Image (cartoon, grey):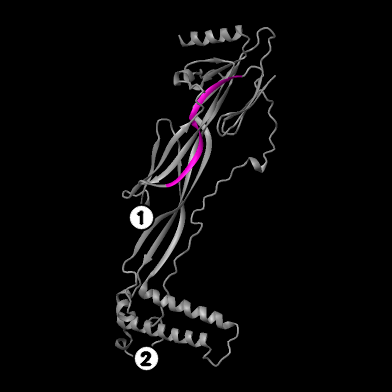
Amino acid sequence: MKKLLVLLFVVIALNTNAQYITNFAKNVNNKETDGFYYHLPRNIVRVDFVVERTQEVKGKYSSYAKELLNTENFIKENKTTFAIKDVYVNTLTEADPNMVFFLSAITDEKSKETINVNLELNSEGIIQSFGIKPVKCDCDDDDRIEYRANLLSHAEQGTDYCYLPITEDEEVDEDETESDLKMTDKEIAQSIVDEIKKLRVAYFDLITGYQEVNYGNTINFMIERIKELENKYLAMFLGETSSQTFTQTFYITPEEAKDVIAISKFSETEGFNSKAGETVKINFSDISVGSNITKMSKDDIEKITYANRLFYRNPANVTMQILYGENKIIENRLKISQLGNVSLITMSKMKLTFDTNSGQILSIIKE
């Protein structure tokens, strides 16, 4: 029955001087090679989340911070937190595996000549033009698309603790016993506090000009070095905080009748892909296509053979929101081809060009 139906359309095509037959790809016989496959495009939404990871590390002698430095402002436990700092949205294009068609040319029985098919596709197999003699591509740099991932592009590595070699690696006087050298943690902490006090006295002398030696231009370097050492010693009590930013990328394929897509869960303690936390989701709404464009049914697209017709797309304009829980992070207006309509256009004696990103017709020239 199926072969009879195809034969019927071929006969009709010949009687009306038709030259081309278009079929949905899965209806084509595997042995049929006298034709060409072409795809319609679909759009992928790429979402780049810029995430900041903050690490708090308590100091080795934090237990003595209150007693020796008289402060409560110190890190009491090691902790890592995550925060979404920014979001970037881009659309990419690929061949739609669900919209593949087979275009074949019928031999002209009167002239006994084979009909030429000037069908131009891009590297993905997406239709670019029909009826136009392809121009040889010089492969200019403008045709290349480069994607860069700024993974850890703003990384700020945490500074390791720098401890004074108060008891370690020092030359030991043979007359000193082991008990004389061994110090408790509190004694070491007190000695570090004493060093901090000495550094502050030296800093005061430098900025007030109390020192008798003229250090010239090196005084600024000396001041910076003193503050650097002081901060390292203080970190042994107060702890250190370091931050890194990295990019977490997700690719989402919008689909009909699927307005909300869950991307991942995100928590402040684990970041993305955590089991806890709030769901980050993408919401597609306000999908608008030309109201006067008739929407073809799935059966019309997949089960009917068309003579002298090409399939193309009318993309949809879509409002896209990214939500973290119930909070809106970003809202964009995008053009998504697969959420629009598929239509047909006559191809006999036509020169047609198509937008390979949306599938829309760009130009029509009748010969």
Give the answer, above or below, for where 45 lies relative to 20: below
Q: Which of the 4 quarters of the picture holds residue 138?
A: top right
Residue located at (47% from left, 20% from top):
302
Residue type beneath disc 2: Glu
Residues shaded magenta: 329-346
Residue located at (66% from left, 15% from top):
114
Q: Which of the 4 quarters of the picture holds residue 71?
A: bottom left
Quadrant of the snapshot with the C terminus: top right
Mark linked to residue 268: 1
Residue 331 sits inside the magenta stretch: yes
Q: Is residue 119 visible?
A: no
Decide if residue 73 is on the left or right side of residue 245: left
Q: Is residue 360 visible?
A: yes
Image coords of residue 221 (percent x, y): 55, 79
Mark linked to residue 169: none
Q: Which residue is mark 2?
A: 174
Image coords of residue 226 (percent x, y): 48, 80
Residue type beneath disc 1: Glu
- SS type, badge 1: loop
* In front: label 1 or label 2: 1
Which residue extends farthest front? Answer: 291
Decide if residue 138 is on the left or right side of residue 8: right
Give the answer, above or below, for where 33 lies relative to 180: above
Quadrant of the snapshot with the N terminus: top left
- SS type, badge 2: loop
Alpha carbon separation for disc pair 1 and 2: 55 Å
- Lower position in the chain sequence, tag 1 or tag 2: 2
- Assign the magenta stretch its main secondary structure: strand
Relative to the observer, which residue lies in front, 179 or 220?
220
